[in-house]
Amino acid sequence: MVTDSDLTKHLSEAQVSVELQTEDMTLNIGPQHPSTHGVLRLVARVNGERCFDVRPVIGYMHRGYEKLSEVRTYLQITALINRIDWVSGYANEIPFIVAAEKLMDVEVPERAQYIRLILTEMARVSSHLIFMASYPLELGAATPLFFALRDRERVLDLLEGVTGGRFHPNFNRIGGVKPNAGAGPTTKKTPQDLPAGFLAETRDAMSVVLHTCEEIEDLVGGNEIFRARTKGLGVLPPEVGAAFGVSGPNLRASGVKFDLRKVESYLPYDKFDFDVVVGENGDCWDRWWVRLQEIRESAKIIQQAVDGIPPSGPLQAKVPKLIKVPKGETYVRAENPKGEMGYYMVSDGGTGPYRLKIRSASFSNISMLSWILEGVLVPDIIAIMGSLDFVLGDVDR
Amino acid sequence: MIESITNLFSNFWVSLAGKLLLVATMVPVIGMLLGFAEMKLSAKMQSRVGPYFAGGRWGWAQLIADGVKFFQKEDLIPEDADRPVFKAAPILVMVGTVSLFLVIPFGPGLIFEDLSVGIFYALAISSVGTIGVLMAGWSSANKYSLMGGLRAAGQLIAYELPLVLAVVGSVIMAGTMSMSGIVEAQISAGFPFVLVQFVGFGIFMIAALAELARIPFDMPIAESELVMGYVTEYSGFRFLFFFLAEFANMFTLSAIAATLFLGGYWLPFVAESTLEFTGPLILIGKVFLLTFTMIWFRWTFPRLREDQLQTLAWKLLIPLALANIAVTATLKVVF
């Protein structure tokens, strides 16, 4: 963030000797714009290249998932909530399913828990790789896009192999994960929960991803222009971030060591050894760097989980055929790739929730846009916005 | 027979028509060649295949297909646009580019017009394109275009200076401003000037990149910020004009750099008597080497910010270029 003294210094450099009479221009950035991640609209007042009074306008993509959830069964809702943050669709399902399980008091079998954990971390890797791809692109470098997407494809292939969906797996069921693929009354195949060779391929894919991280760190992080464009830009002090409800890598980049994977117990993360990566300054560079390190940590978790997964066991706890969640209410939150994602679920004992409040990470993360974009240059709007890594589906729901 | 052709071409109007025809074919051909090279090279750098289907093998006809496509497109002019200015802008940009071909020596005597102030003319005429860009940005009645146009103006003013100053070193060494004179000076010196003028060469190439508005200096276009900058509102063959001008400009600026610093059409150990035939090939080879670097840069670097670019120009390149001139001039007097 540009402080006032910086600003005046800059302005004094710009003013040579003549005071120019200028008029502010209102610039509409979006909803159709290459770098607004979909249909975000910013209304900015610009004076030359400098922006004042940036107002985000959201809601172009509102699909009413909270309301739709009220008239659907629990099984149907997982298909919907995949589409909230579509670049990490799998991770959206977890807190919702865990909330329902908590109300029903169902114990999920260990193997199913491990599968959930592996796939959640894969979703995190693929989401962060998308960021690694799109952020340099927003700064003008096109090539990292292809490097990151090439190897994200490996991860998505694995996700697809298990769940059948690349973006929208719809894989979790209350009490476990989806019944075995290919095993049903008509096919009479032997039940097989993970595709053959999945674990070995996952190990391979993770070493590829780790190699890509090295490459990206070299190519993008080692680039002088990239450093010049991101370091010291868009600084988010931890207390401001916390006040706006910012979470996830964006908050950790500001130096706050807060990771729900360590705090909550929605998945057995306590069995794995991984670090919570924090940044120092909370600038764009730190947000980029923290995400890069998180890919590495996720790969570490996946490798441990692949080694530690129980070789066999049930995938599904005993639940009634017709799922009815007992009366009650609960809030379950999880560390999603974009930040804290939570579901406040109220059940009146029916086949669907009475009310479902979705707390999505991106909505809170961009709530500070007008604060952080005050007084920055037009190119920096894009650089800062890109570094926050939001998805419009996650903002508007 | 040959004599009658020579006689025919000594007629001013006939030779003018011949030269115009040659340039008129050269610009699109070079534009397409470099455009295709950019597509294929960027594909290689990004582990892609690139154009593949058009024309059968290697997708060689991709750029021809693209060109045909542009002609079929509707020619849109925004309602609020300043129509005459909007229409004139791409033509002006093209004129600036085409006129540069005039002074590039492709071989001994193979030059459209050997002006005695060749390099001065080249640098002057290359600024005409800037006016075209500013006109395009202003007349489009689009805020992004306007910002792109203003950025282009600021950038091109800042980089015209290092471009001119970088050239001075070579001119001092050659003692002439004529382009073919500079090549001849390098032949008689026996080495390309880049060996002494490496600072000037570096500054020239950086400034040329900025002049071309290519990444890392593509702020006037800045796809992720300004949509397409000053070309946002252009479509059809007007857009094609900008597109071709960019690639043809890449060629001409590289050719000027090759002429001033790399010995132009001359290569050590190639017999001077064969230069009439090998000269154009040598020059084009050098030009392709330089344009390859430009393409390589484009697919490697992110974009600088406008103020960082100005800082680079005014605080680093211009002082460096001035120091280079001072040193060159001193050495010229001493030796």
Image (cartoon, rainbow, N blue to C red):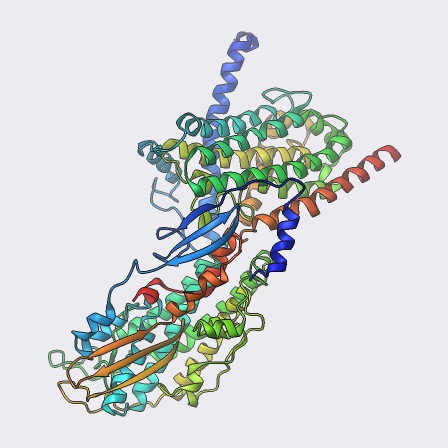
Picture residue at 29% right of the left edge, 60% below the top: A61
- Image coordinates for residue B209, horizontal then vertical, percent: 58, 42
- Residue A307 in sight from this viewpoint: yes
Toward the right, the furthest residue is B334
Q: Quadrant of residue A205?
A: bottom left
- Image coordinates for residue B130, horizontal then vertical, percent: 54, 33
Using residue B316 as the reference point, say whether residue B223 is left or right of it.
left
Picture residue at 49% right of the left edge, 39% below the top: B34
- Image coordinates for residue B109, horizontal then vertical, percent: 63, 21
| Quarter of the image that includes the C terminus of chain B | top right
* Residue closest to the eye, B75 or B29: B75
Total number of numbered labels?
A: 0
Tell me: residue A187, above or below residue B120.
below
Using residue B142 as the reference point, say whether residue B159 is left or right of it.
right
Picture residue at 58% right of the left edge, 21% below the top: B112
- Image coordinates for residue B96, horizontal then vertical, percent: 54, 28
Using residue A374 as the reference point, say whether residue B140 is left or right of it.
left
Q: Quadrant of residue B273?
A: top right
- Residue B290 in sight from this viewpoint: no
* Residue closest to the eye, B299 or A283: A283
Tell me: residue A303, above or below residue B258.
below
Tell me: residue A97, above or below residue B314.
below
Using residue B221 as the reference point, say whether residue B316 is left or right of it.
right
Q: Quadrant of residue B207?
A: top right
